[in-house]
Image (tube, grey):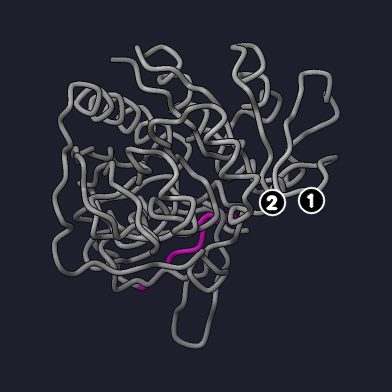
Amino acid sequence: MTLHVAFFGSDCLYTETVLQTLLRASHRVSAVILPASGLSNVRTDLPIQALLPEDASITQYDQHALKVVSPFVGRSILHTAWENGVPLHAVSNLSAPETAGVLKMVGADVACVACFPRRIPPELLRVPRRGFLNIHPSLLPNYRGPAPIFWQFHEGERRTGVTVHWMDAEFDTGPIAEQRAVPLADGITEIDATGLMARMGARLLVEVLDHLAAGEIPYRTQPEGGAYQRWPHDEDFVISPSWPARRVFNFMRGAAVWGIPFILELPGERILLSDATAWSAHEVLDVPLIRRSDEVIIQCTPGTVRANVV
């Protein structure tokens, strides 16, 4: 059985990677739905509107946000949808009858979500007869929220993973359909980690869809615990010499793409750093910090990190 899929996402690497995999699978992507608020030259007074190939002026307008989550600055998910003949829509009001009407019109058996930045209201969750599936780049219930990869770098996680889960009215709390562990190499950037998570999540999603098509419904309640992390703020880029060197290095390498200076806090001093270049697990300095031109060596607990000063 071939399932008809309504696909919700954003103009970013994560969404693009998952969509490309779905387009190669045996199921049919019947519609791609993007948030109108993230696109230029799109009306926001309409609940939902079709975007046609002749609308060449439509672009993702927040270039800083695009830089954070995607290297596809010149390439857009809009082109992917148009080139594959998939109806494309920009949505402003998820609760409007017109939005539910689009899902019914395309005959969506199931909706799949990858990096869609808005909460899906309960009335829309009930429209596809098989419900909504979300691909979340963490091992839920840990690291719920809009920037899980950032927070896993921040906390020094080395073993993480991807969860495909059924969506409910809250963020990232619905029952789990499938999970898969994904190890992160030392020094991996957030862009590379996002691509890695997206590729694994896409394959996992296709497996879940295949089970659904065969009449199986993978479903287990999330374990107790976990927490929701908000969108990162500038103060979340503070690093501490009390952290192990590996954690400092991997956080700075991973989150450097955000373009926000890292803050090293020492007694009576704050130093702004741009990125990390190397780390040692066992090196011990005679002082908390060594300065060399535009570089510093930080004594961590344990080990050392070399980093560039802003």
Question: CB atoms at circles 2 and 1 under 8 Å apart?
Answer: yes
Residue 44 is tagged as 1
Which residue reaches farthest bottom? 268
**What percent of the width, then of the height, locates residue 248?**
35, 59
The magenta stretch is 288-295
Q: Residue at x 60, y 36 (%)?
A: 102
Q: Is residue 239 above or below residue 214?
A: below
- Name the quadrant containing residue 157: bottom left
Quick check: 215 left or right of 114?
left
Q: Quadrant of the C terminus?
A: bottom right
Quick check: 308 left or right of 75?
left
Residue 92 is tagged as 2
Q: Amino acid at mark 1?
A: Thr
Q: Residue at x 24, y 43 (%)?
A: 161
Residue 203 is tagged as none
Q: Quadrant of the N terminus?
A: top left
Q: Is residue 87 above or below residue 148?
A: above
- Name the quadrant containing residue 77: top right
Neighbours of disc 2 within 10 Å: few (<14), some (14-19), many (20+): many
Q: Nearer the viewer, residue 285 or 263?
A: 263
Q: Amino acid at mark 2?
A: Ser
Q: Nearer the viewer, residue 251 or 25?
A: 25
Q: Residue at x 52, y 46 (%)?
A: 116
**What percent of the width, then of the height, locates residue 223?**
13, 61
Q: Residue at x 83, y 19 (%)?
A: 54
Q: Which sits earlier in the primary sequence, circle 2 or circle 1? A: 1
Neighbours of disc 1 within 10 Å: few (<14), some (14-19), many (20+): some
Q: Is 68 covered by the magenta stretch?
A: no
Q: Nearer the viewer, residue 181 or 48?
A: 48
Secondary structure at badge 1 equals loop
Q: CA distance from mark 2 to mark 1?
A: 6 Å
